[in-house]
């Protein structure tokens, strides 16, 4: 009997072991417990409904639990359905018997589902602002997820979860500025750590790839770091303008093409606000074409027309919250002429520092106000170093140009936002200009904030030309100069041939205007020239110029040729924008005055015309009284008298628009005879001569400067004014 009982027990035990072994190894497929599983899942969240088909149960005898696996279940919530590939879970036998929540862990694998549907499911469990923002910016795409979740006895997900998967063909639109398309990557999510791998996307049509981006959550921040690269891309400029509308320089870019490799890090809070962004980039700039609007290079580079092209630049960028550091080098084209340069730009909280070196060989360079020209084919190096501060002040620590023996050096030059000089410490030039004239000059700031200008030689002809050719007041190059300038120059050229010896004197500026000036010098023939400017207490400005050798000054006026001898005395008084001036030139002769030669020819005074176009005609006196206001010069009276001819003229000249002159031209013999006919006075001045009648020419000159019309009429009677002025000059002489 005992043996039989033992056999039955052994058989039962064996069958139990076999059943348990079978259920542990192969499991049991049934739908008998589906309702119980659904009930337990609904305890996680009652908004989720799950539809199960056949379920496989596998016993874990060592943990007294049942492993459950089902394929192709469907999850539905809020009218949406998710296709699930498989779900695995575990039921504790004890908790199942006690009708408690019995799921210990949950493993699941989804099919390819829409990202927005997955986000909606996530919002059921954790309805955070991040999910809302993601749901707003993600417009399309698919996701597959493999997840492993562990639950406590209250059904809460433990922190040791693991989720991995992939995203394909996602599309994001961030504020209609940043468009991400064909966004593909794999991801792994553990507690507080998110790994994004094999990223491939189009960012505003820029191809971006990244092997890894790591996101770590600490407290309420996400710490993001990783790397990415972009393929060589010819960018859509119009899209860039819309994306970065706050960068006006983009309006001047015609084309940009580059590739890059980048390492970055940043912090993101739970409201998706970025902070502590850092990036290190290596950029291969293939091509950048920029219009000339901002660069204004045409005044310095004669070969420059419309655009500048940068090619093959290697650029590194190191950026963080405290500093931006950019270094680069490459080539640039002005039209078809190529040169190269290197550069560094550093931006901190206060300043933008820059350091550049330009190797200029194939392009010519012109500095007009210095009359300096570097010809094409000559190698020169331009070094520029300085900073731009938050007050819009531009400071150049150094500007240096070297070309063979030629050098231009500037130290500590400060400009305001309108490029007016605030301060300068040193300006030194040593070069031969295109006239082969040596310019050796130094401007230096002294201890007492005054300046000294000293040098061996300087070509001032371009400065003089600019002053004489411009009727308007020149715009000051200083912002507000209040200093005294001491000048000592051994040789100062006023044109290609003529120069002054030992120019010396002082200039005092108050509020950017000349308050007092006194300059003296000699010509090589020992003739003197003096210039003075004095500002009175009533703001009247008195200008005086005297030269005992005026020929170099007069020869600048093209309508007078062959000027010789004489001396020049100029006086001007200016107040309230109106100047009244007197110009006197005595004891001179001219070889050719084309406009008056034409008048004499028209008047059939051929002998006088021959004098004006032949050996020359002498004048004993020339005096002109005139005034200037804005663009109009009014000639109150211009009178010249000489042994052969005398002229009286008045009128006005509107700068570059209109000339209107009229006057009287009379041979000297006629003048003598006319004055001789005056009772008593004529005998005293001229003597007893028989008069043959009065004869001369009245004339009018009018029209645009380049198309003057001249008309003449013989006159029989001289005006009292002409006679009076002639008598005054005769008495004076």
Image (cartoon, rainbow, N blue to C red):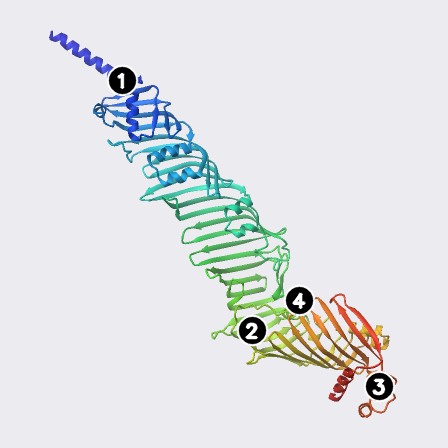
Q: Earlier in the sequence, mark 2 or mark 3?
A: 2
So how many labels did they put on this image? 4
Between marks 1 and 4, how big is the CA–CA gap? 107 Å
Between marks 2 and 4, how big is the CA–CA gap? 31 Å
Q: Are marks 2 and 3 in contact (CB under 8 Å)?
A: no
Q: Earlier in the sequence, mark 2 or mark 4?
A: 4
Q: Earlier in the sequence, mark 1 or mark 4?
A: 1
Q: Does the rendering let one see residue 278?
A: yes
- Tell me the residue that label 3 is attached to: 673
Q: Considering depth in this image, is 342 or 348 the residue closer to the camera?
A: 348
| Corner quadrant of residue 31 | top left
Rendered location of residue 356, percent (x, y): 51, 57
Q: Does the rendering let one see residue 559?
A: no
Between marks 2 and 3, how big is the CA–CA gap? 52 Å
121 relative position to 365: left or right: left
Q: Considering depth in this image, is 527 or 72 the residue closer to the camera?
A: 72
| Corner quadrant of residue 580 | bottom right
- Single out the mark in the foreground, 1 or 3: 3
The residue sitting at 77% across, 87% down in the picture is 727
- Tell me the residue that label 4 is attached to: 435
Rendered location of residue 583, percent (x, y): 69, 79
Rendered location of residue 398, percent (x, y): 51, 63
693 relative position to 642: left or right: right
Numbered badge on residue 23: 1
- Tell me the residue that label 2 is attached to: 513
Q: Earlier in the sequence, mark 4 or mark 3?
A: 4
**10 Å neighbourhood of mark 2: few (<14), some, or many (≥20)?**
some
């Amino acid at each position: 009997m005992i043996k039989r009982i033992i056999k039955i027990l052994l058989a039962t035990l064996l069958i139990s072991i076999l059943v348990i072994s079978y259920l542990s190894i192969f499991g049991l497929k049934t739908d008998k417990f589906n309702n119980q599983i659904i009930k337990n899942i609904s305890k996680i969240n009652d908004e989720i409904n799950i539809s199960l088909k056949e379920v496989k149960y596998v016993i874990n005898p060592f943990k007294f639990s049942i492993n459950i696996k089902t394929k192709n279940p469907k999850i539905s919530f809020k009218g949406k359905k998710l296709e699930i590939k498989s779900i695995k879970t575990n039921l504790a036998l004890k908790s199942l018997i006690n009708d408690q929540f019995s799921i210990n862990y949950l493993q699941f694998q989804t099919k390819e589902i829409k990202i927005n549907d997955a986000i909606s499911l996530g919002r059921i469990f954790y309805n955070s602002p991040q999910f809302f923002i993601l749901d707003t910016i993600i417009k399309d795409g698919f996701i597959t997820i493999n997840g492993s979740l562990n639950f406590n006895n209250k059904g809460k997900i433990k922190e040791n979860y693991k989720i991995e998967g992939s995203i394909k063909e996602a599309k994001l639109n961030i504020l209609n500025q940043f468009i991400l398309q064909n966004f593909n990557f794999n991801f792994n999510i553990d507690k507080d750590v998110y790994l994004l791998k094999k990223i491939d996307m189009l960012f505003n049509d820029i191809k971006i790839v990244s092997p890894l981006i790591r996101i770590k959550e600490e407290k309420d921040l996400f710490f993001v770091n990783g790397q990415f690269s972009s393929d060589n891309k010819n960018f859509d400029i119009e899209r860039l303008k819309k994306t970065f509308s706050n960068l006006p320089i983009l309006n001047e870019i015609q084309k940009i093409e580059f590739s890059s490799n980048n390492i970055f890090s940043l912090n993101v809070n739970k409201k998706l606000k970025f902070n502590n962004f850092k990036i290190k980039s290596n950029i291969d700039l293939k091509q950048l074409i920029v219009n000339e609007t901002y660069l204004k290079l045409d005044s310095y580079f004669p070969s420059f027309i419309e655009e500048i092209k940068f090619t093959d630049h290697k650029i590194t960028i190191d950026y963080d919250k405290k500093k931006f550091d950019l270094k680069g080098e490459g080539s640039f084209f002005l039209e078809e002429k190529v040169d190269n340069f290197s550069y560094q730009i550093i931006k901190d909280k206060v300043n933008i520092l820059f350091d550049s070196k330009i190797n200029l060989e194939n392009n010519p360079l012109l500095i007009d106000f210095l009359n300096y020209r570097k010809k094409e084919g000559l190698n020169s190096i331009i070094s520029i170093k300085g900073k731009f501060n938050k007050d819009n002040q531009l400071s150049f620590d150094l500007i240096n140009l070297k070309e063979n023996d030629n050098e231009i050096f500037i130290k500590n030059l400060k400009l305001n936002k309108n490029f007016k000089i605030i301060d300068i410490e040193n300006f030194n030039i040593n070069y031969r200009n295109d006239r082969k004239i040596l310019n050796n000059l130094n401007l230096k700031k002294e201890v007492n904030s005054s300046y000294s200008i000293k040098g061996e030689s300087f070509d001032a002809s371009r400065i003089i030309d600019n002053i004489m050719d411009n009727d308007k007041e020149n715009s000051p190059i200083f912002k507000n100069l209040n200093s005294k300038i001491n000048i000592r120059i051994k040789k100062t050229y006023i044109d290609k041939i003529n120069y002054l010896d030992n120019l010396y004197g002082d200039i005092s500026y108050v509020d950017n205007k000349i308050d007092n000036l006194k300059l003296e010098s000699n010509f090589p023939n020992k003739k003197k020239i003096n210039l003075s400017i004095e500002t009175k207490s009533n703001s009247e400005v008195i200008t005086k110029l005297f030269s005992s050798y005026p020929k170099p000054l007069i020869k600048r006026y093209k309508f007078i040729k062959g000027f010789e001898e004489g001396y020049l005395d100029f006086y001007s008084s200016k107040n309230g924008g109106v100047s009244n001036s007197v110009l006197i030139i005595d004891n001179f002769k001219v070889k050719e005055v084309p406009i008056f030669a034409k008048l004499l020819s028209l008047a059939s005074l051929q002998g006088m015309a021959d004098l004006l176009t032949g050996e020359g005609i002498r004048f004993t006196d020339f005096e002109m009284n005139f005034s200037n206001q804005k663009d109009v010069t009014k000639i109150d009276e211009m009178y010249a008298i000489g042994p052969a001819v005398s002229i009286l003229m008045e009128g006005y000249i509107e700068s570059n628009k209109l000339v209107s002159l009229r006057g009287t031209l009379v041979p000297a013999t006629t003048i003598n005879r006319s004055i001789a006919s005056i009772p008593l006075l004529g005998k005293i001045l001229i003597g007893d001569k028989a008069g043959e009648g009065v004869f001369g020419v009245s004339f009018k000159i009018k029209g645009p400067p380049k198309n003057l019309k001249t008309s003449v009429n013989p006159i029989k009677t001289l005006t009292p004014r002409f006679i009076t002025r002639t008598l005054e000059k005769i008495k004076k002489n």
